Amino acid sequence: MKKDFIVDNRSRQGIGIEAETTATLRQADFAELTWLKNTLGEKFIREFILYLAKEMIPFVENLYAVPVNALWHA
């Protein structure tokens, strides 16, 4: 099961966040965030996929795969 979130600011700039219940990502996992990026255009800031692996991986510009446990570590 996955959940998608869009967070925006007062200027209507958006950040896409997708939560995956897997430790392995596939190209298809980026489809919805790619759609968001194309839809928002210049209003798009950044996108993240939260997943169950142990390391953060930068993909293309402004797209990162972030381990969900990083949310609890400073």
Image: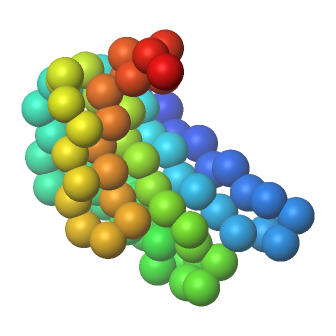
x and y, in percent, of residue 71 in the image: 48, 22
Q: Nearer the viewer, residue 22 or 63?
A: 63
Residue 58 relative to residue 66: left or right: left
x and y, in percent, of residue 41 in the image: 55, 84
Residue 7 visible at all: yes
65 to 32, vertically: above or below? above
x and y, in percent, of residue 72 in the image: 49, 14
Q: Nearer the viewer, residue 51 or 38?
A: 51
State the residue at coordinates (19%, 23%).
53
How many marks on residues? 0
16 to 67, vertically: above or below? below
Residue 43 relative to residue 27: left or right: right
State the residue at coordinates (56%, 68%).
45
Residue located farthest toward the front when viewing the structure as drawn: 74
Residue 13 relative to residue 54: left or right: right
State the residue at coordinates (35%, 59%).
63
State the residue at coordinates (63%, 50%).
6
Splitting the image into 4 quarters, where does residue 70 fall?
Answer: top left
x and y, in percent, of residue 43 in the image: 65, 78
Residue located farthest toward the right when viewing the structure as drawn: 10
Splitting the image into 4 quarters, where does residue 40 fall?
Answer: bottom right
Residue 1 visible at all: no
**Which of the colour schemes (rainbow, by chain, secondary structure, one colour) is used?**
rainbow
Residue 18 relative to residue 5: left or right: left
Name the image quarter holding the N terminus. top left
11 to 47, vertically: above or below? below
